[in-house]
Amino acid sequence: MYVIFLGPATWTLDMAKAYDRSEFYGIDISPVFPEDIKPANTHFQLANITNRLPFPDNHFDFIHQRLLIFGLTRSDWTKAIDELLRVLKPGGWIEFKELELNLENTGTMTTKLKESMITMTTTRDMNPTIGRELRLLLIQRGLLNIQAKRISVPVNHDGKIGELFWDNYKQMSLALAPVISGSLPLDFPQFLDSCAKECAKEKTNWGWHVVYAQKPVSPIRFSH
């Protein structure tokens, strides 16, 4: 089985260890791959998903993409999905995992933080609601057996899982600080600490979308 993954490399490494008879290909636009510790059935390659990927048509059995909400514009999403479907085998499966920016049950400070992220994406022609729209995009392309679900996870409450998702949200916020912190307090790390306490108090939740579907055996016509 041939599998292609777009997103954090840790998933590729974990899956390659668990399924050692499959070949895993990790794709990224930047050279951030852990070359020294990768299993023998793992391959990393520089590529831009909005351009033609360096693979033939109908090559992969499974494609997994996650967390590109900050990496693709609205028009990029159309190109990216079509290109992924080009390299997916007929009968193969494709899966997307994307987060929401509009947190639930937020206090004053966390509301400012999430709104700054939403403003940043919209002004750069990114799509802050892409997770909710993926199902329709796959329907429009004729995919089969489409399944879509939304998962609400705790942020800094309800035990260890809440702590982990707050840490994810904090790291995401720090990575975006250069482009969102202009409208937020100058001491950004301290501001995030205050947001963490607020999330625990307000029982903040974070929505994630999981969408997967199967490519039909008959040909699909792509837009590019």
Image (cartoon, helix red, strand yellow):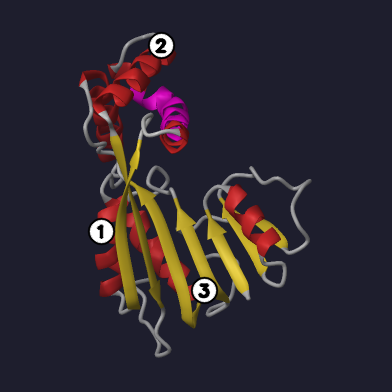
Q: Amino acid at mark 1?
A: Glu
SS at circle 2: helix
- Residue 160: x and y in percent read 47, 34
Q: Which residue is mark 1?
A: 133
| Residue 211, quarter of the rendered image | bottom left
Q: Residue at x 60, y 49 (%)?
A: 9
What kind of secondary structure does the magenta stretch mostly adopt?
helix
The reply, left or right, for residue 17 in relation to residue 54 is right
The reply, left or right, for residue 89 in relation to residue 96 is right
Taking the magenta stretch, the answer to whether it contains residue 173 is: yes
Mark count: 3
Q: How many C-alpha atoms fall within 10 Å of the one at disc 2: few (<14), some, or many (≥20)?
A: few
Frontmost residue, 67 versus 196: 196
**Pointer 2 and pointer 3: residues touching (CB < 8 Å)?**
no
| Real-space CA distance between mark 3 and mark 1, rounded to the nearest whole angstrom | 22 Å
| Real-space CA distance between mark 2 and mark 3, rounded to the nearest whole angstrom | 45 Å
Which stretch is magenta?
A: 166-180
Q: Which residue is mark 3?
A: 87
Q: Which residue is mark 2?
A: 190
